[in-house]
Amino acid sequence: MVRYVLLFLFSLLTACAPMGEVVETEELQIEFENLWWEIIDPPPWLSDEDEIVCYCFSTAEDVKPPADGVVLYFEEGHLYSRILSTFQRIEDGYHLSKYEIDLKVLSNEDEDYFVEVSQGILNQTSQIIPCSL
């Protein structure tokens, strides 16, 4: 039993290896914020397999400090976007207060972007692309 638990933990840690370097805060404000992004191969708990969902870290909304903006999401087939959470810029990414998760945006030498979502010791890394909707 212990062997299976260790194997599970090892697979989690190796599956979450960084996909690139963390994008700096100043670059995030130019290259990431206020643009719509789609997660390639999202985890099954995030959305249906056939449904496209896009996300935007918007600074255009009025928010109360310490929030810097809101995370909007738009689902395929819907007419409008909705607010998912407020976000706060932190040293290496964002903190989504509603869900108590941290998010880092990574970029590799091919200029592919990835997001690493962390909550406690658990994290998930997925590639993102500009929204196709």
Image (cartoon, rainbow, N blue to C red):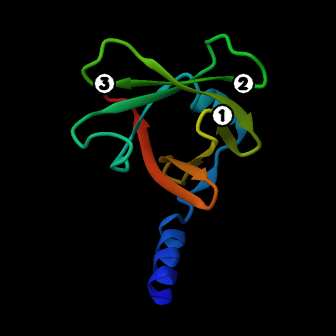
Residue 30 image offset from top left, x and y in percent: 63, 27
Q: Residue shown at 52%/64% (left/top)?
A: 16
* Secondary structure under the numbered disc 2 in the rendered image: loop
User: Which residue occupies the foreground of this view, 21 or 126?
Assistant: 126
User: Which residue occupies the foreground of this view, 111 or 123?
Assistant: 123
Residue that numbered label 2 is attached to: 67
In the image, is 27 to the left or to the right of 52? right
Measured in 3D between alpha carbons, the distance from the residue under mark 2 to the one under mark 1, in whole angstroms, is 9 Å
Residue type (three-letter) at the residue carrying disc 1? Ser
Residue type (three-letter) at the residue carrying disc 3? Leu
Which of the two discs, 2 and 1, sits closer to the camera? 1
Residue that numbered label 3 is attached to: 133
Measured in 3D between alpha carbons, the distance from the residue under mark 1 to the one under mark 3, in whole angstroms, is 27 Å
**Badge 2 vs badge 1, beta-carbon distance below 8 Å:** yes
Name the image quarter holding residue 20.
bottom right
* Secondary structure under the numbered disc 1 in the rendered image: loop
Residue that numbered label 1 is attached to: 97
Label 2 crowd (10 A; few <14 / some 14-19 / many >=20): some
Label 3 crowd (10 A; few <14 / some 14-19 / many >=20): few
Name the image quarter holding residue 121.
bottom right
Residue 130 image offset from top left, x and y in percent: 41, 32
Q: Residue shown at 30%/33% (left/top)?
A: 52
Quarter of the picture holding the C terminus:
top left
Residue type (three-letter) at the residue carrying disc 2? Ala
Which of the two discs, 3 and 2, sits closer to the camera? 2
Which residue ends up furthest to the left in the rendered image? 50
- Above or below residue 41? Residue 72 is above
Lower sequence index among marks 1 and 3:
1
